Image: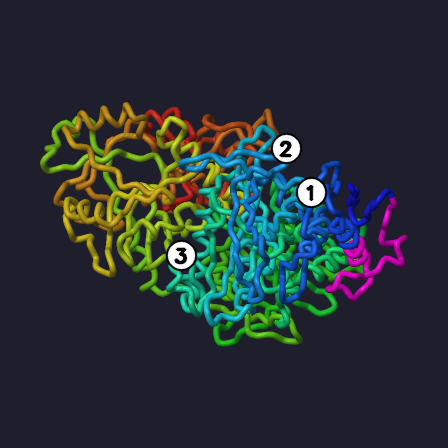
Amino acid sequence: MQLDVVILGRAIQLDGHIHEPERNRSAPNSFHAYSRTHSPVKGLAVARKAFQHVCMAKRDQAVKVGGHRIKVSNLDKVLYPSTGTTKGDVIAYYSAIAETMLPHCRDRPATRKRWPDGVGPDGTGGSFFQKDLGDSAPNWLHTREVEHQDHVNTYPLVNDEATLVWLAQLASLEVHVPQWRFDASGSPQNPDRMIFDLDPGQGVPFKSCAKVAFMIRDILRDMGLESIPVTSGSSGIHVYAALDGTQTSDQISSVAKELARSLEADYPDDITSSMKRSLRPGRVFIDWSQNNASKTTVAPYSLRGRIAPTVAAPRSWRELASPHLRHLEFTEVLDRVEKRGDPLADLVKGTPVHNDRLQKYRSMRDASRTPEPVPGPSIDTQSEDAASEDVRRALPQFVIQRHDARRLHYDFRLEHEGVLVSWALPKGVPTDPAKNHLAVPTEDHPFSYRKFEGEIPTGEYGAGQVRIWDAGEYELEKWRDDEVIATLVGRPGGGLGGKRRFALFRAGESGGKPRWMIHLMEPLRSRDREDAAELTPMLAEVGASETLARLDPGEWAFEMKWDGIRAIALVDGERTTLRTRSGSDVTSAYPELANLAAAANAEQVVFDGEIVAFDPDGAPSFDLLQQRFGLTKRRDIEKARRSAPATYLIFDVLSVNGQDSRSLPYRQRSELLKSLVERIETVPVVVPDAFDGPPEDAMEASRSLGLEGVVAKQQQSPYRSGERSPEWLKFPFIATTEAAVIGWRESTADSHGLASLLLATRDSDDESGWKYAGRVGTGFSTKERRAIRARLEPLERKAPVTEVPSDVRRDAHWVKPKLVGEVTSKGRTRAGRFRQPVWRGWRPDKRPDQT
């Protein structure tokens, strides 16, 4: 006897008759776990009845699924004794969930966990993982080979319903897949999703995993990624985020590890990221390692081999916050999918799910009725005008607007990740450090709102007059979910009256909403400034070319001169902070260096080094590194990181575990440094060796390697923070000079560009403190000319220098000297102006007073 059962979604063709949930009203609901009458229930009931008919056949037992004939047997065999769930029930579930589950498995090599005899009454039972295809596999399966260290395995691809039914027939209750797919040619691609597996240690309640999942969600949002939780059906929670496929598994694993380690550092008593099982009791274990290319994770919607037929079930964040959160069984999952669809559907679109932070703003405004800027929906939340500028600002922007609406208040807005994060101040901006003011969080505003002034019409949201009270740039000290500290630098004549330091902090809740306050802080203490000075690097004087040959190799060490930006690295435990010569914190701009602590053989250490970007030939490229300057949005940083990855070259050590090492001679500091840095593949950190040989050979070696020159250091010299000392001499191949940009001249060919930049250097004899140093008109692309002009226009003011040639003054636009650039030239004239200067790029690591 041969019986054809064709499974058509939730309809069954049995012996030539179509059984559909809507038509088959009389079909007995014999599936024990169902009591409701939704269509997936009826579909499974029909499916199980069909498999029961097959089971009664005496030979040639087969079902036909998607045109493929699959032999089935023992459909009444109980695989979950505690619930009586049979193999027929399992096959029916995988058939019904196939349409939803397959997109999360497609083109991924599948490892199966099989329970031929069922899971056992206590959730144990004999099980094993199967990676190889097996001799009984049908020839219609989609398969791919994966090369392991010492062998090659052929894996099935779970690309269709028939494959799921075949796996279920083999009692493969669990399907495990990696985070990457094969492409059409069979080559493994980069991962298209990131995952965190949260596993509760002994004594840890399930809700603790949910708490950690929310922490991970918030960090991923800061990275521009939205995430989706999955209750694993076993013991913990998975958190998924979609990726754009531009990074390798090793890179994603490194990011995931660093995220896990940062949370462990913040909550050491509650979280562990260590693979040591002895550290897991009492903590939530964040398993970041499943992002490794060789690792797999149970697929979404897969059954689990537990005491009950639970499922790895995608959930909403709202569900995860419920105090009644629990794992779901497969009957519940089918019902949920029927009613709500797949919460994980966005994950398979192939691009990250970005959070549209302006959605609420747009929903509250009618662009045809209000003069306010209302940008259209975009993955890039920054407004179109800001995006087109391609601006690399030294500091983020702020605006405080006086809003005379139904009630007069002030709107306090800080640029952060492409939008203006906003608070309403009903009592205005605080002027007394002893009196805090209420700060009411409002919706994020577009970046272009920083320039908005006007009348919002009656009947529109926020109707009333808006005027800019003050605006400018701010220096960020801290940005957390519950606290922001920033120093605002207002414009001349603005309401702030100059520079003011504020703290915004969360102070509980009011009416179920977060309650925030704003506090006027005291300026940084002089001791704080002294501490900052202690972290400034020692500088070298320029040596005459004829001097180099006279230096004794026994008394001097010769290092290569690197074409990058100088940075002091402070390692404290597992935290790393990077500060430039100007004192700016650039840690977030170089996330690949954030785990520097992993390479440091000390709990606390301060390094001196250079951040560089290497070109394809292995030579440092300042042009390439320019791509990394001035970026604040995580998405922009990650994009630039892919095209211009940074390396930190360490050449000195200032302190170790609180012990100041600067008084030690250079020779001893070098030996100490070598013992403090461990070479780790995932940390782009190098301690370059000093050149062993005569100075002329060092110069020739630098030239042949495409480097910038040589730095000679006296073997007995101490480290003198903040000083330019003749104990260090630099011998560059190309003379470069830093200068303040004080204006630009109009371009006759491009109304949005510029003809040249106007430069100045420090001059203590001039009452302005500056001296005109000439103009530079080469070294720019058209795009760069436009971007530079867009950056300078908001800074326009009267001329900051006095003695300027009349032909330059005639069409000059002047700006405040606060941005530093670097040029090469053929020296200076007697008047101090550059000869034939060529623009090299911005120096955001330096202040104008350091030129």
Of the numbered discs 1 and 3, the one sitting upstream in the chain is 1
Is residue 771 shown to the viewer in this render? no
Q: Residue at x 55, y 70 (%)?
A: 506
Q: Residue at x 44, y 29 (%)?
A: 776
Q: Nearer the viewer, mark 2 or mark 3?
A: 2
Task: Check if residue 31 falls in the magenta segment.
Answer: yes
Q: CA distance from mark 1 to mark 3?
A: 42 Å
Of the numbered discs 1 and 2, the one sitting upstream in the chain is 1
Give the labeled residue for mark 2. 139
Mark number for residue 384?
none
Q: Amino acid at mark 1?
A: Lys
Q: Nearer the viewer, residue 391 or 6?
A: 6
CB contact under 8 Å: marks 1 and 2: no
Q: Nearer the viewer, residue 272 or 391?
A: 272
Q: Nearer the viewer, residue 82 or 297?
A: 82
Give the labeled residue for mark 3. 275
Q: CA distance from mark 2 to mark 3?
A: 40 Å
Quadrant that contains the N terminus = top right
Q: CA distance from mark 1 to mark 2?
A: 13 Å
Q: Secondary structure at mark 1?
A: strand
Q: Secondary structure at mark 3?
A: loop
In the rendered structure, which segment of residues is drawn in magenta?
17-46
Mark number for residue 71?
1
Q: Position of residue 255 (x, y in %)?
A: 46, 48
Q: Amino acid at mark 3?
A: Met
In this rendering, would 518 be left or right of 379? left
Colour convention of the picture? rainbow
Q: Give the main secondary structure, helix, strand or loop, of the magenta stretch.
A: loop
